[in-house]
Amino acid sequence: MITKGYNLPCSYVVHTVGPIISERLQKKDCEQLSDCYRSCLKAALENGIKSIAFCCISTGEFHFPNDKAAEIAVETVREFKKADRGRMEVAFNVFKDIDYEIYRELLTQN
């Protein structure tokens, strides 16, 4: 779902809900998380949005492991940008130092 940004410093907000991990991480959880990122990117593209920022979807209260969630996020975005020829600008907005380190390492890899 996409809504206007109203008083936020952005024009739109793309909403998504990632998987909740109740026990062991399973393949379907990873696929669902990837689908969240992909559907947000697709919604942004379809609405003419040129840039998007992601927080760490499903980590924290939903208990998705931070390192695996970051791997999925970066991989999904890279695949999308390759198909989109890199036209959309994507940022990862992280709040915790550990997430910053995880994303920094992933994003500096080829």
Image: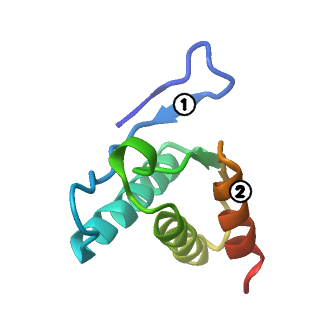
Quarter of the image with the N terminus is top left
Amino acid carrying mark 1 in the image: Tyr
Name the residue beneath numbered marker 2: 100
The residue drawn where x is 38% and y is 42% is 61
Q: Residue furthest bottom?
A: 110
Do we see residue 7 in this rendering?
yes
The picture places residue 24, in percent across and down from the top left corner, at 24, 68
The residue drawn where x is 44% and y is 58% is 37
Do we see residue 90 in this rendering?
no
The residue drawn where x is 52% and y is 50% is 56
Q: Residue furthest front?
A: 23
**What is the quadrant of residue 86 in the picture?**
bottom right
Q: Earlier in the sequence, mark 1 or mark 2?
A: 1
Of residues 10 and 92, the one nearer the viewer is 92
Amino acid carrying mark 2 in the image: Tyr
Specify the label residue 29 is tagged with: none
How far apart are labels 1 and 2 at the CA level?
25 Å
Specify the label residue 12 is tagged with: 1
16 with respect to 20 (left or right) = right
Q: Please rate how many residues cluster around mark 2, counting C-alpha atoms within 10 Å: few if below 14, some from 14 to 19, many from 20.
A: some
15 with respect to 31 (left or right) = right
The answer to whether marks 1 and 2 mark residues whose Cβ atoms lie closer than 8 Å is: no
Of residues 32 and 39, the one nearer the viewer is 32
8 above or below 67?
above
Q: Please rate how many residues cluster around mark 1, counting C-alpha atoms within 10 Å: few if below 14, some from 14 to 19, many from 20.
A: some
73 above or below 59?
below
The picture places residue 78, in percent across and down from the top left corner, at 59, 74
The picture places residue 109, in percent across and down from the top left corner, at 73, 82
The residue drawn where x is 71% and y is 56% is 100
**What is the quadrant of residue 70 in the picture?**
bottom right
